[in-house]
């Protein structure tokens, strides 16, 4: 793609995100979401492969339906209460429709079917944008309306997302699909806590975005898309592969890595809210996703391809690792000891 066009699309993405997260009026928030959708479509379909075009079409249709529901929800609320302010979403029907619309935008179960397919059809860099920055505006809208959302509905969506994100990721061989189901599972953790402690949802999102960015950028550096190629990629940049192992375990939420922090805080908050059964259930369901993270980690560093014939070793690349990946990897692995400081900032 033309670098100038690429730059325009990236700037439009940032603009759309900024408009949505800084707006008070529903129409401005909707405008930001639309700018985001239109800016990401060329980035999804830039390879001109039939699968990329299919992914862009699926993304466009889903996001259009979700945007229409956001508009419908805000108009219903304005009709009943006379308020266009985002924080004044008080009508129960409006908040129900909005929750469905945001679930569709984010890819929460049962509106998750588009997300793995779209991620599979996109390049790794676009996949990174879809998994991180494109999730920020809908989560910001949930954050602003969190006081009027339905707790039962969100808890149900969250537990279903964690369950299906774990189960459906178990038999995948394409790494992008595994990361898509990982994203659905993590969104479940964010959705369950948004009503009780919205700041914790944002903290979880920031840490998740950081760890996912590390994984996508690492995979982009070693040019890996499937588990079978991941097994033979360890000869390219061995040190980067070792750090990828730690980042995957951090994303799984194992102590003493960064990813343990949000899970620990969310379980603590749910227990304070007398939701110990929900906390127990969501913790047990996250063991499903732990399995596929361990499988990815195992393929990354521990296994050789399972056949006895001599296979061709990949050339070790001399290019130095990107400084961005180095910083992100360090943060993805080592932030747990400074968690008290992080909590004072949040």
Image: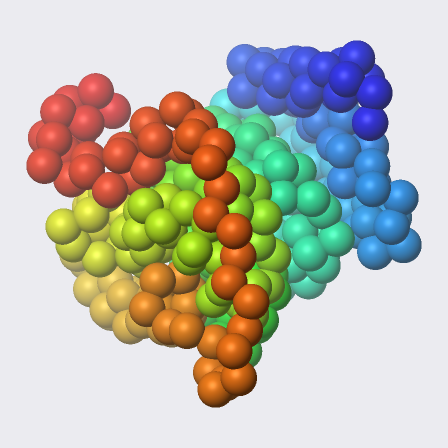
User: Looking at the image, which is closer to me, 74 or 247?
Assistant: 247
* Residue at x 48%, y 32% (from the top left corner): 319
- Position of the C terminus by quadrant: top left
- Position of the N terminus by quadrant: top right
Which quarter of the picture shows residue 277? bottom left
- Percent position (x, y) of residue 112? 63, 59
Q: How is the image coloured?
A: rainbow
- Percent position (x, y) of residue 196? 30, 42
- Percent position (x, y) of residue 212? 45, 43
* Residue at x 48%, y 86% (from the top left corner): 308
In the rendered image, is residue 330 in sight?
yes
User: Looking at the image, which is closer to me, 250 or 58?
Assistant: 250
User: Looking at the image, which is closer to me, 43 or 297?
Assistant: 297
Q: How many marks?
A: 0
Relative to 115, 148 lies left or right = left
* Residue at x 27%, y 33% (from the top left corner): 331
Q: Is residue 128 above or below residue 50?
A: above
Q: Is residue 181 above or below residue 100?
A: below
Relative to 138, 49 lies left or right = right
Which quarter of the picture shows residue 108? bottom right
* Residue at x 47%, y 66% (from the top left corner): 231
- Percent position (x, y) of residue 16? 67, 19
Q: Is residue 160 above or below residue 186?
A: below
User: Looking at the image, which is closer to me, 111 or 81?
Assistant: 111
In the rendered image, is residue 184 in sight?
no
Residue, far bottom: 308
Which quarter of the picture shows residue 111? bottom right
């Amino acid at each position: 793609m033309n670098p100038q066009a690429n730059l325009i699309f990236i700037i439009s993405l940032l603009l759309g995100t900024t408009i949505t997260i800084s707006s008070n009026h529903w129409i401005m928030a909707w405008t930001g979401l639309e700018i985001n959708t239109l800016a990401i479509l060329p980035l999804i379909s830039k390879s001109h492969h039939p699968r990329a075009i299919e992914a862009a079409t699926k993304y466009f249709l889903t996001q259009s339906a979700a945007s229409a529901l956001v508009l419908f929800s805000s108009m219903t609320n304005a009709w009943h209460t006379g308020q266009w302010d985002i924080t004044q979403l008080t009508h129960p029907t409006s908040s129900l429709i909005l929750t469905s619309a945001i679930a569709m935008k984010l890819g929460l179960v049962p509106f998750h079917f588009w997300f793995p397919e779209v991620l599979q059809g996109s390049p790794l860099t676009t996949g990174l944008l879809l998994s991180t920055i494109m999730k920020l505006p809908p989560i910001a809208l949930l954050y602003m309306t969190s006081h009027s959302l339905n707790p039962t509905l969100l808890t149900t969506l969250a537990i279903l997302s964690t369950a299906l994100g774990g189960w459906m990721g178990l038999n995948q061989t394409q790494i992008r699909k595994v990361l898509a189901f990982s994203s659905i599972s993590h969104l479940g953790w964010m959705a369950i806590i948004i009503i009780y402690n919205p700041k914790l949802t944002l903290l979880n999102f920031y840490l998740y975005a950081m760890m996912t960015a590390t994984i996508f950028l690492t995979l982009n550096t070693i040019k890996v898309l499937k588990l079978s190629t991941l097994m033979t990629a360890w000869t390219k940049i061995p040190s980067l592969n070792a750090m990828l192992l730690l980042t995957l375990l951090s994303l799984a939420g194992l102590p003493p890595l960064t990813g343990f922090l949000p899970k620990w805080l969310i379980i603590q908050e749910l227990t304070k809210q007398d939701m110990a059964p929900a906390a127990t259930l969501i913790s047990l369901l996250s063991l499903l996703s732990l399995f596929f993270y361990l499988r990815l980690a195992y393929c990354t560093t521990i296994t050789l391809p399972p056949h006895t014939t001599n296979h061709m070793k990949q050339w070790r690349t001399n290019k130095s690792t990107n400084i961005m990946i180095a910083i992100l990897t360090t943060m993805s692995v080592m932030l747990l000891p400074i968690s008290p400081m992080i909590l004072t900032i949040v």
